[in-house]
Image (cartoon, rainbow, N blue to C red):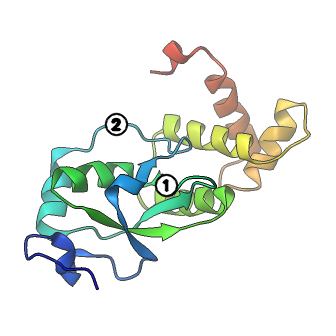
Amino acid sequence: AMSQTSTDPIANEDFLPDTYDALLPVEKLVHGEHNPRRVQPKETLEQSISAFGINRPLIVRPDPCDDLYYITDGWQRYQAAVSCGWEQLPVRIYEDTLEALAATEMESIVREWSTYEWAQYCRSLAEEIDTEADSKLEVARQVASHTNRNTETIRRYIDVLSLPEEVHI
């Protein structure tokens, strides 16, 4: 068993979600390339984690080669918890990228994603789905089958993201 100091938030069961797969050291967790959110966490999130802990595990998938885990959902919780001194974080582990993305989408329905975050998520799905499709419409149709968005919306998302990076902001 790991020795827990009383200052370690994880020593307090109330600070952890009801269910999670594992507690992973923060140095093994990295930002997933498919995580649409890159913004800094709000101060209120740090205050909440400091006072009440983490109520939802981070969604992660293991790196096939290294002993690392990519965060597909929970990057802000990760940053906030680290700045509160957490050394390990509760995670749900998904071996498969598409499964991790689907779980991330389920989480996003609970809290609103911006249109841009949705667009990035759809682009990630389009990259992950091994599609032979050449037409944007067919790619959009396949992505739509994995989400709760319609084909036309997804085609617009993918079109917008094919614009140069500096336009995205």
Pinpoint residue 52: horizontal percent, then vertical percent: 16, 70
46, 154: nearer the viewer: 46
Residue at left 46%, top 77%?
21
Compared with 91, 117 (above or below) is above
Identify the mark nearer the N-term, 2 or 1. 2
Looking at the image, which residue sits at the far left?
A: 6
Residue 138 left/right relative to 121? right
Quadrant of the image occupied by residue 148: bottom right
Residue at left 55%, top 42%?
118
Q: Secondary structure at mark 2?
A: loop
Q: Which residue is mark 2?
A: 39
Q: Which residue is mark 1?
A: 68
Indicate the amino acid at tag 2. Val
Residue at left 51%, top 57%?
67
Q: Quadrant of the N terminus?
A: bottom left
Quadrant of the image occupied by residue 136: top right
* Dot label at residue 97: none
Pinpoint residue 40: horizontal percent, then vertical percent: 28, 38
Residue at left 63%, top 17%?
163
Q: Secondary structure at mark 1?
A: loop
> Label 1 crowding class (10 Å Cα cut-off): few <14, some 14-19, many 20+?
some
Pinpoint residue 100: horizontal percent, then vertical percent: 59, 60
